[in-house]
Image (cartoon, rainbow, N blue to C red):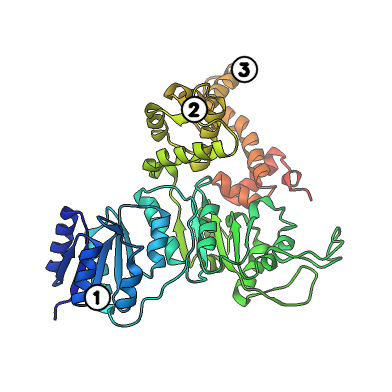
Amino acid sequence: MAKSALLVEDDAAIATVITAALEDEGFEVARSESIAGRDRLLAARTFDVMLTDVVLTDGDGIETLGSVQRAHPAMPIIILSAQNTLDTAVRATGTGAFEYFPKPFDLDELVRAAQQAAARAGESEVEQADTGGALPLIGRSPPMQDVYRMITRVLGNDLSVLILGESGTGKELVAEAIHQLGHRKTGPFIAMNTAAIPRELIESELFGHEKGAFTGAVARSIGKFEQAQGGTLFLDEIGDMPPEAQTRLLRALQSSTIRRVGGREEISIDVRIVAATNRDLGPMIAEGTFREDLFYRLNVVPIRLPPLRERAADVEPLARHFLRQAAEEGLPLRRLAPDALDLLTRQPWRGNVRELKNLVYRAALLAREETIEAAGVAGLLEHAAPSGEGAPQDLAGAIRGWVDAERPPDGALYHMALAAFERPLFELALHRTGGNQLRAAHLLGINRNTLRKRLSELEIDPDGFAARP
């Protein structure tokens, strides 16, 4: 027996394509261009699945779904939308829709979803969730649509989420969205950057400590886990967590209990864990610097946040948003000329959204006219982050200066240059890793035994770079 589908879509071309694809798979399709037409069709008969656009000729397709769901509680609904924002994705999911597809969508994927929905028709009443308002995650590019869809999938559960992305992509904002739009939104949201905490204090920060647990512990302290009870604990830069803290974190996640440093009492915890990292944990697991079992505990639902260079279409709305935000914070109200926006869109943005925001704020502060032209943006870009085009030239200049000063004989340049630059390179790696030789070797991309040997030969003491309490 053929499955039936109701398609509510006011774009005739899109409706024709979807109808043909569904009919090819054996569906009987009824079409409407409006909410009024939809309601007439639903009053006359039932359907196995409904596919509906959001913006229709006579109203909002999402806002009017309540009456449809009350009259047809077992009919799965698939929502289509060109309004590709997180707010739309959350509103769609909040209705209890079977699936949400931002336009443009993969037609084969849409047909598969319709088949799955029709197969489920009549099984159970669609469950509705109150997801509240949306956060200002900006962007309608396809990569961001994937992020929005993943966010909506975890709002009604407590599965651990691991957000993967480069620095500056907005990982904490995604974590906040998961919390504030999810069922734990009435609880606290506690964030902790594990890379910013000295390794000897990180367990105390996580689990708290009792009075007298260590020198300086003059009173009991409540850790992040207890602070986040009933809510969400966001562990940023989880890849920088020391191994000993990883072990205790794993135990806490496995047992849903913690013990304060210096304490004996087991304390039950009820928190959702969202972690994030800008590092590739795979090689760290292979090297033994990150626990594989902890990775699998955290990586139940991975969300990859794309770098800004993969979502160039979002640069313009982001820039306009930051200009409005800057004005709200007291900076002059500015606008970007079309050529300035074009120049911003063509940048690589190695610092991602954070770099774009900083540049827009500087432009708003320094611009003399209300409209920021491309020349003004270009001037700011020339003095932007050292990761820009000037960095290789600066390094080449430093090498030329060293060669001119040392004047190495023919045949010795390569080995003398390596010897000269090896020491400061190793010292930089040790400084950045607090003297941790394993992490320094990983940063340099060499074997730890090789690093130890060279440190001995160069008479570099790694203990001299250890973090001080």
Residue type beneath disc 1: Ala
What residue would you read off at disc 2? 381
Q: Which residue is painted at 55% across and 36% down in the image?
A: 327
Residue 17, image x and y in percent? 15, 58
Residue 408, image x and y in percent? 58, 20
Q: In terms of sequence position, does the residue under pointer 2 or pointer 1 come before the other?
A: 1
Q: Which residue is painted at 55% across and 20% down in the image?
A: 400
Quarter of the figure with residue 206:
bottom right
Task: Classify mark 3: residues with Cα within 10 Å, few (<14), some (14-19) or many (20+).
Answer: few
Q: Which residue is painted at 40% across and 75% down in the image?
A: 127
Residue type beneath disc 3: Ala
Q: In terms of sequence position, does the residue under pointer 3 or pointer 2 come before the other?
A: 2
What residue would you read off at disc 3? 405
- Alpha carbon separation for disc pair 2 and 1: 53 Å
Quarter of the figure with residue 59:
bottom left
Residue 307, image x and y in percent? 44, 46
Quarter of the figure with residue 51:
bottom left
Asked which secondary structure carries label 2, the reply is helix
Asked which secondary structure carries label 3, the reply is helix
Instruction: Indicate the quadrant containing the N terminus: top left, top right, bottom left or bottom right.
Output: bottom left
Is residue 191 visible to us here?
A: yes
- Which label number is shown at residue 118? 1
Look at the numbered discs 3 and 2 and tell me whether their residues touch, using CB distance below 8 Å. Answer: no
Asked which secondary structure carries label 1, the reply is helix
Of badges 2 and 1, the one in the foreground is: 1
Residue type beneath disc 2: Leu
- Alpha carbon separation for disc pair 3 and 2: 32 Å
